[in-house]
Image (cartoon, helix red, strand yellow):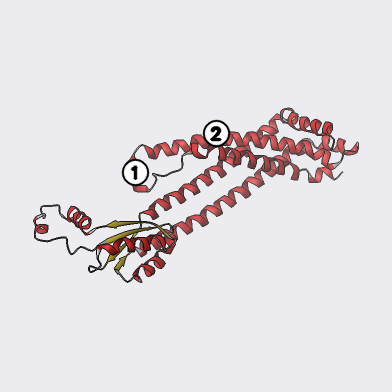
Amino acid sequence: MRGSNFSYLVRQGIGSVWHNRMMSFASFCILMVSLLLIGLALLTSYNIGVIIGNIEDTNEILVFIKPDVPDSELSHISDRLRSNYSYVESVVFVSKAEAWEMMKEYYGGDGVEYLFESIGGEDMPSTFVVSLNDITMINTAVSHFRAIEEVESVRASHDFAEFLISIRNTLTIIAIAVLIALIVVCLVIIYNTARTSVFARRMQISIMKHVGATNAFIRFPFFIEGMFIGVIAGAASWFLTMQAYESVVEIFTQDIMILEILGLSNLVAFEDIMWYVLGVNCLLGAMLGALGTVLSMGKHLRV
């Protein structure tokens, strides 16, 4: 295609947006709402993953060391826990004195402090608090830690971990199903809207065919038109997504305690991903708009 023809067809496609403004506006609204729903679904799915991850981070394994293990060996045990297992996120050592103080603080209220006065903290075990980067490895981690000779016992919340894994898997399946359903519904609506727009200009297409225009020559302006509308709809849906997302986040951020309890303290800030969201919205809008318009022209080109 020559450069002059290309620029002519691009101008025709963009000009058609105004010449057929009513149908263009309908396509714009459909695309904007569709992209808004898809964007909000993706952001919700992503943040659900963040929330589950925050809760998973609180699920720790306690590794108790045998009383007869000398303090000089504790550093070696810590290195083994930290470096020999890829699923270990962090290892925190709790000394006997620290464990004793924590116990007194936890159980020493309600006027029973005197019970601790006659008890020493020498019998408290040295403990390592281990966090995992993959909660599905909790059973494997417990087995490995118990195999260490200096370890007396290992304590982990297996039931809670399995519950979190089940929730995460279920939510992942639901999110994928909802996203696929949204995309299919959006494609059907966009296709039907584009077909209505093309039907309104069927005479124009028929005349172009009779004067010898090729299918590609006829399709290209419609392709540009659909892509142009899709880009504008993507930018508009990005703005609405930003407003809706920030409004919802602001509701939760009014109370920091709610954030901590629900594991929402690390929700992704929209300004951190705003340009990625804009790019994806415009690209997806252009693809959907162009594809829906071109596909809907099929029978009108068979003249």
Q: What residue occupies the far front of the structure in this picture?
A: 72
* 68 displayed left or right of 226: left
Q: Where is residue 76 in the image (x, y as percent from the top left)?
A: 33, 63
Q: Position of residue 139 (x, y in %)?
A: 40, 67
Vertical order, 25 against 34 (above or below): above
On residue 239, which mark appears? 2
At numbered mark 2, what does the secondary structure look like: helix, strand or loop? helix
Amino acid at the residue labelled 2: Phe
Query: Image quarter for residue 38?
Result: top right
Q: Position of residue 301 (x, y in %)?
A: 83, 43
At numbered mark 1, what does the secondary structure look like: helix, strand or loop? helix
User: In this figure, which residue is indicated by the disc labeled 1?
Assistant: 258
The residue lying toward the viewer, choosing from 129 and 56, is 129
Q: Position of residue 145 (x, y in %)?
A: 36, 67
Amino acid at the residue labelled 1: Ile
* 267 displayed left or right of 223: left
